[in-house]
């Protein structure tokens, strides 16, 4: 199969015409025909999983499964079992044997999302599995051959993690045979109208009665000036919100949420002044601002903690601990932002 041919290569889920997107699509086209490991990097919400799925769907393995696992969303003590499976009685609660993701992905592709969050001990076991193309289930002694293509992704700087001793250099080189960087939305802002149209098309596929909305020049200009910290995921959520809340055929400036129309400056002097007006100390002010950031991230991601942790660039377990410590509940208002 000649995957370089325009007749066989398809990447319709990645919308855009900017040079940055064209470069990503061209790299996908080149790497799809091979079996080389690809490390996809980029900020949270940029569409790294879409890129991985495009590689798989254009590869000779496309008729076999692509199995995804988010290494940052699963506690470390459970991740080994999720990856490699376990035997009955391997640990408390292991009432029966279970296949791991590697076995489920045999002959296909495994996508290791947020690989930078994997513990050093598990990195050693993953490296051994990749080198030997064999795995051992937790609590087992027999080895199982695996035939999978490895795609991985992270929003972390793995080079810095290597320097800090939290990520193995030999595993990095094993995963990073072909690097592929996905650009943030702010660096491809001219794609914004195309992306909005793309997400409205997806809504039309679910709701046949939905009619696409236009955007006033003022509304589009404001959207283009926004920094989009949540990238493509944040935009898709906004389009979904506007499709429900705006009843007219055209989205106007007043229809956009306050966090976009009233963007804070790099130094929010109002918030700083309020600290002194309240008479609170430095530590309490820092705690309140942390709480406001967490609430903002949770609201932007519809209270999906794994996504909020990605937006905040912290581990999910750390976020959960802070939510419990600060007694954050879903009906609370953001104090600063």
Image (cartoon, helix red, strand yellow):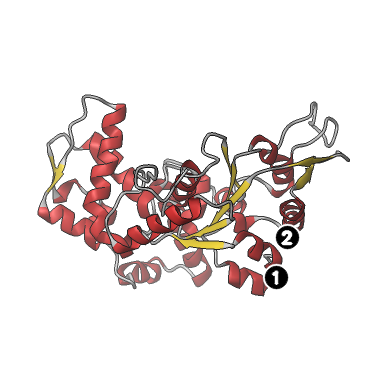
From the viewer's side, name the closer residue of 197 and 143: 143
Residue that carries the numbered disc 2 in the rendered image: 120
Q: Residue at x 39, y 71 (%)?
A: 276
Q: x and y percent of residue 9 in the render?
A: 39, 45
Q: Position of residue 208 (x, y in %)?
A: 24, 25
Residue 131, above or below 136: below
> Do residues under tags 2 and 1 come within 8 Å of each other at their CB atoms?
yes
Q: Is 8 in front, or is 188?
A: 8
Residue 206, image x and y in percent? 31, 28
Foreground pick, 195 / 262: 195
Q: Is residue 262 visible?
A: no
Q: Residues within 10 Å of mark 2 (few under 14, many from 20)?
A: some
Q: Earlier in the sequence, mark 2 or mark 1?
A: 2
> Where residue 172 sits: x, y (%)?
64, 64
Image quadrant holding the C terminus, namely bottom left
Q: Which residue is denoted by mark 1 in the rendering?
A: 165
* Left or right: 289, with 123 as reference point: left
**Measuring 52% from the left and 63% from the top, which residue is drawn there?**
179
Q: Residues within 10 Å of mark 1 (few under 14, many from 20)?
A: few
Closer-to-camera residue (323/40): 40
The quadrant in which residue 225 appears is: bottom left
- Cα distance, mark 2 to mark 1? 9 Å
Q: Residue furthest toward the front?
A: 1
Dot 1 falls on a residue whose secondary structure is: loop
Helix, strand, or loop for circle 2? helix
Q: Is residue 110 left or right of residue 212?
A: right
């Amino acid at each position: 199969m000649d995957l370089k041919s325009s007749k066989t290569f398809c990447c319709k889920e990645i919308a855009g015409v900017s040079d940055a997107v064209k470069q990503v699509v061209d790299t996908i086209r080149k790497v799809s025909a091979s079996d080389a490991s690809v490390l996809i990097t980029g900020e949270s919400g940029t569409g790294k999983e879409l890129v991985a799925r495009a590689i798989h769907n254009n590869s000779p393995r496309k008729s076999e499964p692509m199995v995804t696992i988010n290494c940052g969303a699963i506690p470390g003590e459970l991740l080994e079992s999720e990856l490699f499976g376990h035997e009955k009685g391997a640990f408390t609660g292991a009432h029966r044997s279970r296949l791991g993701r590697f076995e489920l992905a045999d002959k296909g592709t495994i996508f290791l999302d947020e690989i930078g969050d994997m513990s050093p001990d598990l990195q050693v076991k993953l490296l051994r599995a990749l080198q030997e193309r064999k795995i051992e289930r937790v609590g087992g002694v027999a080895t199982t051959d695996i035939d999978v293509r490895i795609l991985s992704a992270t929003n972390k700087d793995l080079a810095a993690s290597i320097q800090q001793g939290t990520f193995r250099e030999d595993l990095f080189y094993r995963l990073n045979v072909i690097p592929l960087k996905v650009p943030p939305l702010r660096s491809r802002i001219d794609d914004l109208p195309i992306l909005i149209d793309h997400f409205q098309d997806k809504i039309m596929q679910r709701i046949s009665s939905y009619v696409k909305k236009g955007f006033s020049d003022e509304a589009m200009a404001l959207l283009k000036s926004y920094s989009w910290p949540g990238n493509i995921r944040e935009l898709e959520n906004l389009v979904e919100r506007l499709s429900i809340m705006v009843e007219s055929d055209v989205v106007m400036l007043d229809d956009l949420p306050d966090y976009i129309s009233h963007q804070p400056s790099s130094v929010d002097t109002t918030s700083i002044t309020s600290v002194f007006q309240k008479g609170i100390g430095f530590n309490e002010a820092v705690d309140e601002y942390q709480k406001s950031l967490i609430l903002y991230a949770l609201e932007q991601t519809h209270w999906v903690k794994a996504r909020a942790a990605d937006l905040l660039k912290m581990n999910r377990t750390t976020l959960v601990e802070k939510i419990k410590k600060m007694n954050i509940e879903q009906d609370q208002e953001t104090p600063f932002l």
